[in-house]
Image: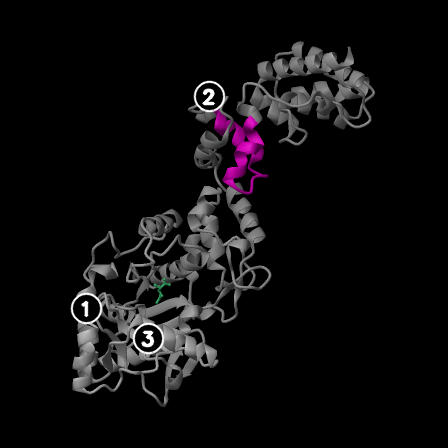
Amino acid sequence: MPEKPVRVRYAPSPTGLPHVGNIRTALFNWLYARHEKGSFIVRIEDTDTARTVDGAVEVILESLRWLGLDWDEGPDKPGSFGPYRQSERLEYYKKAAEQLVAQGNAYYCYCSSERLEEMRSAQIARKEPPGYDRACRNLTLEERASRLESCQRPVIRFKAPLEGSTSFNDIIRGEVTFENRSIDDFILLKADGYPTYHLASVVDDHLMQISHIMRAEEWISSTPKHVLLYQMLGLEPPQFAHLPMILGSDRSKLSKRHGAVSITQYRDEGYLPEAMVNFLALLGWSLDDKTDIINIQTLVENFSLERIGKTAAVFNREKLEWMNGVYIRSLEVDELARQALPFLEKDLPLSVKRPLDEEYVKAVMPLIQERAKTLSEIPSLVYFFFTPDIEYPAELLIGKKMDADAALHALEATLEKLESTQAFDHDSLEQRLRPLAEELGLKAGQLFGAVRVAVTGVTVSPPLFETMMVLGRNKCLERIKQAIKKLSCRVD
Ligand code: GLU
């Protein structure tokens, strides 16, 4: 028999913004689909109406698009197995639940929420594991009729086997077995006619012909329930692969504190999608246990389920930052300028005229390309190239082991030297200023420090001569004059 085509899905619940863990799951499914030339399906699991958040679906899709994870079928991309929002598929779940009732594998439960609440509190008080006490499991016809009078909207519960065990093969973990005793008579269909996650995901994974279910490890305890449902419905389960957990750097469960914020926040903080994809791919998968920088094509070519690990992956924010820096350095200057532009437009001081001159932005970028770790820090590294004026305290002009007089003198001499020439390239600047330091009895660093502050307003900047070249002769002379003025006021 020919192998079934690979069809995998990312099945987010739109209950909030997608974070690192969710998107790692999406990425692994996407990589596997692309590696196997199969299909990647996005299915929106919006059956928990109380927890559904408006706009979340859009952000989920936007996050996938930003990372370049395209899908073959999804809520906005009709395919043969749609619709791809569970709230639009209620009929399928109802039918499956009713089939299970008819077969004797499920039953109507009329218990009120108050009764369930009381039962739960009593269980907790007795230190018993919470679970449904199966009060409605074996009702007679008459009992059912009388309960129906007081409860118009029963739920449907699964009749979990009371003995034996349920096993499945997990591609990553091997054979996994759960005692049936530990499985609750969980709800399949809620009173509002919506299915629970368990029923909906089994029905859809079957109907959508999903070949492999790849999801986070936290779902592993749901899998025996799903396997039982497949059995009772007479369906063949897909293959399962539960992805390793992601922990924070202190090895506790990953949370906001560790930087597990939403993916769109990383975008807004100036991470490149290429870096994000590379970083996420290594959370639980490796090419060869040593290569860190792997582009998306190489990931697709080499992705395999065999190289997904069992042990938890550690989310290391410093590594992400480092990786982002590597990707920023590898960009063509024009591309870096294109990507930095929105950050500059947004974060440069108001005094800077918009729209920015793109050619000028391109000239500035090489000066910070080596240093920037994120796009969002670029405005703070380069603002003095753009602002009409620079603000700084006069003391900043006075370097180590110098006084105001010496700094003033140094800047006056610099001004004179620069005014006497039109040449403003790197070598001309170096040839004039280096010997000047000696003439003035200063270390080169002392003189360059004063000039740097005069032209940029900061003590740490990109290389001085390149900075001066990009700023241009006029601006540099004007700023040095300003600096002289500032110092003169102090000296007088
Ligand atoms: N809706 C579940 C989630 O948000 C999907 C779990 C699964 O992949 O089966 O994670």
Element class at badge 2: loop
Which quadrant of the view contains residue 178? bottom left
Q: CA distance from mark 1 to mark 2?
A: 58 Å
Q: Looking at the image, is mark 1 or mark 3 nearer the viewer?
A: 3
Crowd around label 3: few <14 · some 14–19 · many ≥20 (10 Å): few
Q: CA distance from mark 2 to mark 3?
A: 67 Å
Residue where numbered disc 1 is placed: 92
Q: Which residues are magenta?
A: 360-383
Tell me the kind of residue under disc 3: Arg
**Which mark, by number, is residue 115?**
3
- Viewed as shown, does residue 51 lie left or right of 281? left
Q: Residue at x 70, y 14 (%)?
A: 484
Can residue 210 be seen from the camera position used here? Answer: no
Is tag 1's residue or tag 3's residue first in the polypeptide sequence?
A: 1
Q: Is residue 331 above or below residue 464?
A: below
Residue 272 lies, in percent from the top left, at 46, 45
Q: Is residue 25 magenta?
A: no
Question: Considering the image in quadrants, where does the N terminus appear?
Answer: bottom left
